Amino acid sequence: MKYLSTRGGEAVTAAQAIVQGISPTGGLYVPSSFPQLDIKSLNTDYLDTAYAILSKYLPETDGEELRQMLKDAYRSFDDPAVTPVVPLTETESVLELWHGPTMAFKDVALQILPYLMRNSLRLTGENHEIYILVATSGDTGKAALEGFCGVEGTRVLVFYPYGGVSRAQRLQMVTQEGDNVDVCAVRGNFDDAQTGVKKIFASEEARAALEKLGCRLSSANSINFGRLLPQIVYYFTSYRSLVESGRIAFGDRVNFCVPTGNFGDILAGYYAVRMGLPVNRLICASNRNNVLTDFFEQGEYNDIRPFYKSMSCSIDILISSNLERLLYEIADRDEAQVCQWMEQLRDNGRYGIGEKRRAALGELFAAGWCSEEDTLSTIRRVFGKYGYLMDPHTAVAQTVYERYRERTGDDTQTILLSTANPYKFASDVLSAFETPGSDDFMNVERLNGISGVKVPAGISGLRGKKERHLDVCDLDEMQARVIRKVSVHA
């Protein structure tokens, strides 16, 4: 198995792709082929399924070592299923991806990525310290800090949009302890922070300066294939769960509805389809930042539009990095075509894929979006009818799915991807029932009183913790911030 860049360049090994994060040409690494997986051969054990999938993409990694990595990575999850499936209606189930230490779906990948990174460093003979840059819209930051904290040979710097994450998300990041972790707010939105990180990766000046200081850049965002790969697993395990519960038989197709902004979570579902998972529709759910909805419906990607801050802040994104990997596939792996689209996006803020390609995507993908009012209404309705408490991102998915079903009449068994524990957004979720106060911890208690849903220790434990990372920088200061921090520790 080799890995190719969406924008051309030399093929690399899995270990090289994980260590580099992004290719020297600026492209994203993709597997040279998609190995097939016999669903009937899988059992219900999450770690066994993860091994069956990851081992196909990581051929250089020793099998017993990989099994131990998986065992160590997922022992911190509070559910033995790791990502349990909860029935909601006769045709709808919720895939809970937030049972890891930071209560968000990013834990599924970022608890195993440090192990994959260390293994890849050994396989490549890399002797530099790996400096991991992260741009986060809320959840990736804490998950990366938690996953890489104390990992030898690595240093982590997380940039998050100032005022653009929930208060709980911010507290999780700024209270993080550890000698090799760092956090800085950026004056701008997530797209600005993500673009800033990509510019640092592309900067010869930054690369040379860090090289002199004994560092090499890598990423823990889903632009790193090592971050994306573990997310394929829960598409297979959730399918198997529906089989075991009698909701479907082997071979039946299912729908997945995914709240996504950067397109990584749903792309993992697309990769699962390419590996043989029977899927009817991958439904892309957006909030008011509905650039992906327009792309799938119109065949044009256009990020020249207002940016909205919403309660589903982790999908407040207008530049969806992982869409480039899908573009590579629909362009028949023509890197020149991908480069042209990316240049058009950079220069003009838009590109079009043509009606033929748009129609081809429509055979698998559907898309929709909803407003803030819709999100709150869904949280209130679902809890009132089913006793299930959703965070805003999951509510976006449920709203979009309900509208899809009404529009199409499609009653295929559907799995909603639930990406965060509702208490990470306690004030917003509370506002679906009553007016929240200004004290987030009091709002947590009030939401607990209404719902009876247990408050995670990871939320209640934030009260009174020291805020350690209070830096704020402008976009044009990000590169200097990176180099300065390395210089201090060199």
Image (cartoon, rainbow, N blue to C red):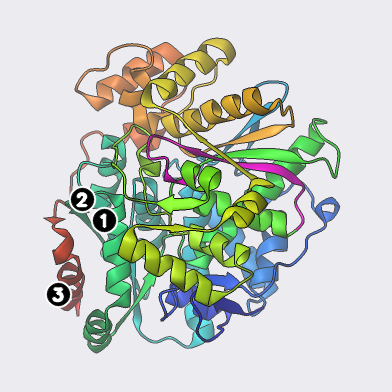
Quick one: label 2, few (<14), some, or many (20+) residues within 10 Å?
some
Taking 6 as reference, is 253 above or below it? above
CA–CA distance in space, label 1 to label 3:
26 Å
- Nearer-the-camera pick, 59 or 70: 59
* Residue 4, image x, y percentages: 57, 77
CA–CA distance in space, label 2 to label 3:
26 Å
Evaluate if marks 2 and 3 touch, with contact meaning CB atoms under 8 Å apart.
no
User: Which one is earlier in the sequence, the residue at label 2 or at label 3?
Assistant: 2
Evaluate if marks 1 and 2 touch, with contact meaning CB atoms under 8 Å apart.
yes
User: Which one is earlier in the sequence, the residue at label 1 or at label 3?
Assistant: 1
User: Amino acid under label 1?
Assistant: Asp
Q: Which residue is mark 3?
A: 488
359 within the magenta span: no
Give SS at disc 3.
helix
User: Amino acid under label 2?
Assistant: Gly
Quadrant that contains the C terminus: bottom left
CA–CA distance in space, label 1 to label 2:
6 Å
283 within the magenta span: yes
Q: Measuring 63% from the left and 51% from the top, which residue is drawn there?
A: 361
Depth-wise, is mark 1 or mark 3 nearer the camera?
Answer: 1
User: Amino acid under label 3?
Assistant: Val
Asked if one can make out residue 385 in the rendered structure from this viewpoint, the answer is yes
Quadrant that contains the N terminus: bottom right
The stretch in magenta equals 276-292
- Nearer-the-camera pick, 138 or 51: 138
Give SS at disc 1.
helix
Depth-wise, is mark 2 or mark 3 nearer the camera?
Answer: 2
Say which mark, if any, is on residue 188: 2
* Residue 82, image x, y percentages: 60, 44
Give SS at disc 2.
loop
Q: Which residue is mark 1?
A: 192
